Image: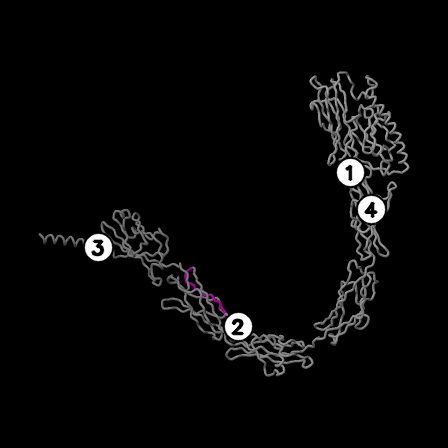
Amino acid sequence: METHISAQHWRRYVSVFLIFSTAMNTACAVTHYSIPEEMEEGSIVANLAADLGLDAKTLVKRKVRLDVIANKRYLEINKETGELFIAEKIDREYLCNSKNPSCFLKMDVSIEEPIRMFNIEVEIMDINDNVPHFRRDTMHLDISESTPAGERFSLNNAVDPDFGTNSVKSYHLSDEEHFSIEIQTGRDGSKFADLVLKNALDREEQAVHNLILTAVDGGVPARTGTANIIVRVLDTNDNAPQFDKESYTINVMENAPIGKLVIELNATDLDEGTNSEIIYSYSLYTSEKTQAIFSLNSNSGEIRVKEMINYEDFRIYDMEVIAMDKGPNSLSSQCKLTILVTDMNDNHPEMSIKSFQSPIKENVAIDTVIAIVSVSDKDSGENGIVDLHIADQLPFALRESSDNYYELVVSQPLDREKVPEYEITFTVTDRGSPPLSDNETMTLELLDVNDNVPQFPQSFYTIPVMENNAPGALLSSLTAFDPDLHENQYLVYFIIEKEIVNTSMSMLFSINPENGNLYALKTFDYEIEKEFLFHIEARDSGVPPLSSNVTVHIIIVDQNDNTPVIVSPWRAHGSVVEEKIPRSTDKGSLVSKVIAIDTDSVQNSRITYQFLQVTDATLFSLDQYNGEIRTMRMFSYRDPRHQRLVVIAKDNGEPALSATVTIKLSTVETAVKAYSDMTEVPLEYDIFSDINLYLVIGLGSVSFLLLITILVTCVLKCQKPMPSKAAPPSRNSVISERNSTIADSTLVSNDAYWYSLFLAETRKGKLVVRQPVPKAGSRYIVSSLPRSTGLTETSDSAASTLQGSTTTGSSSS
């Protein structure tokens, strides 16, 4: 039984072995493929199913498998199509030896049912994907300039990882003038380059050669790599020192100081190192006398004065200097020097001022001689010729009178006020080289001449003076200036006399004759004098005296020194005015009118009116500008029968001045006509009423004042008074008309009022108001009579005190 089984197993083994042997024989056939390196991933290499005679549809079922012999899998098989494709890029230089001509990937393909195995071989072909490169980017070579042509120098070769024709094939050199390249091939096919010296080098011509060595491979297209070759040329002592010039001629001044540099010789050697270091020395052709006078520095080549040089002893020195380098087999050269001694200008010129006039008057005539100067120099030739100079900007000139003699004369007009004295510096200079000079300074003083008139800073002075000034008050200081000296500068001030209304300026003003201080001698009143115009003279004390004058304009400035005077309503006794008014008076009716006058001007005379006290503020109104008191409503039975009104009239001065009036109003039941009609129709009540009594008193006063006015006017006419200037009108109800024939203080009122006559007392005299028959546009004149006939500008028209006028041309007395 066992034998049978064994025979049976054997037969089965033989059958399997035959099948295996058949498979093995089939598998021994190798399928060969060739691909280039660096193929992209996924690229198809071959279709194994078609190449191996397999059915692509059964590959998955038969479990086809690719076994890679190497450790890394670069290829894969698509089990559905049987295609062999790239799984990872293949770098031939990494996979195989770059010097090995063959580079293969070996793998087995196995399949079951039945089992079969195929050998596949993929050859990796090289491509030119690497550039040649040198192991060292820069190579240094030292070559002596004495190296003969044809000498060879080994260089580092370039390497290229590519294979065959893609590796390094040749070398190129950038400089073909002095060097060339010879290429050597190694046993492994590597290319080596040798640097060959074509021509001998000269360090003095070019000390360093910068070369570029280029390696070129055999690929298509060819790729290259480069390296720098720096050749440093080593020096040899092949150049002798050379002087800048072969001979020198040098001028040296006699008496040159010891150690003075005569010349610094310069010899250059194109070699380097010790081959270029130079030593200077005198040759045997240089005399001992010369070597005793001049020293030579062996290292720097400086020749300096060793002893004092005297032109009279020796005028020319000859010498020869050798320059020798320190290299082996020293080389040398010579140069010749000729030193010429130059005569030195060693004597200073001299001068002597024979006469000099100082001081002199500033008005001295042009060409006047004020000094004589002589000059000399002990040197000879150009060194002995001298010139004399003074500063160009001076008003003087030098005039040569004879050999070496000069005259100093006045060339321009002199003015002591501009330049009181001059520092005149005489400079004498010879014509030597370098020139020598000497100088001497003299002071010329100028004497003053009275040739300048006094000068005021201004040609016109306007001096404001506040009225009511204190007598003797300083108004201004009018100081003049005279640039002259001493008595020609001492000034005396005068007021040039001028009469105004038989009054001279010296009675009104005074000036200090020494300092020009102007004083007021009296107290001025703006309402009388408003301005003065006169001249002040300044005179010096020279012979003859000179003078100038200036115009002075004194302007009197108004001061609020007059209190307003209430002229309406007229008050006979005390300050209380009693009035009567019908209780049936309508709203807006004129009850009374307050008129005040102020003899000041402009702002100081502008008057405003206000209630200071009022019994019933709802019953009456007061116009602040014209002083009219009017009813604000009609009277009622509740209103008191008696009303008390206190009105204040205030001017616009600073500080303001004022006056008050008290009006007692009594309401009556009888019919009383309006104030404006009472001048036309006689009053019906008793003829001996207060109004008639006031009228009789007023007419008597007016007659008396008229007589006084006529007498005063006659006196003033004889004195020829000065006409006054116009003053601006006041803002209140009384308007000034100073340009008319009415007296200066005459005031014209535009307001109709029922009073017929009243008297009022003011600072300047009596005020008279004359009432014409009231008509439309009528005007009323208030005029004043001055208390005295002193200096005034308005007394000329005093005769018109009682004159009346109206804008309609009607008047009555």
Q: Is residue 216 magenta?
A: yes
Tell me which amino acid carries mark 1.
Answer: Asp
Labels 1, 3: front one: 1
- Label 2 sits on a secondary structure element that is loop
Q: Please, is residue 345 above or below residue 690 in the view?
A: below
Labels 2, 4: front one: 4
Labels 3, 4: front one: 4
From the top left corner, tell me how far across and down residue 682 is, in percent.
83, 19
Can residue 9 be seen by looking at this rendering?
yes
Mark 3 or 4, nearer chain start:
3
Specify the segment rendered in magenta: 208-220
- Label 1 sits on a secondary structure element that is loop
Labels 2, 3: front one: 2
In the rendered image, which residue does mark 4 sit on?
A: 510
Q: CA distance from mark 3 to mark 4?
A: 164 Å
- Mark carried by residue 22: 3
Q: Residue furthest left?
A: 1
The foreground one among 363 and 520 is 520
In the rendered image, which residue does mark 1 sit on?
A: 558
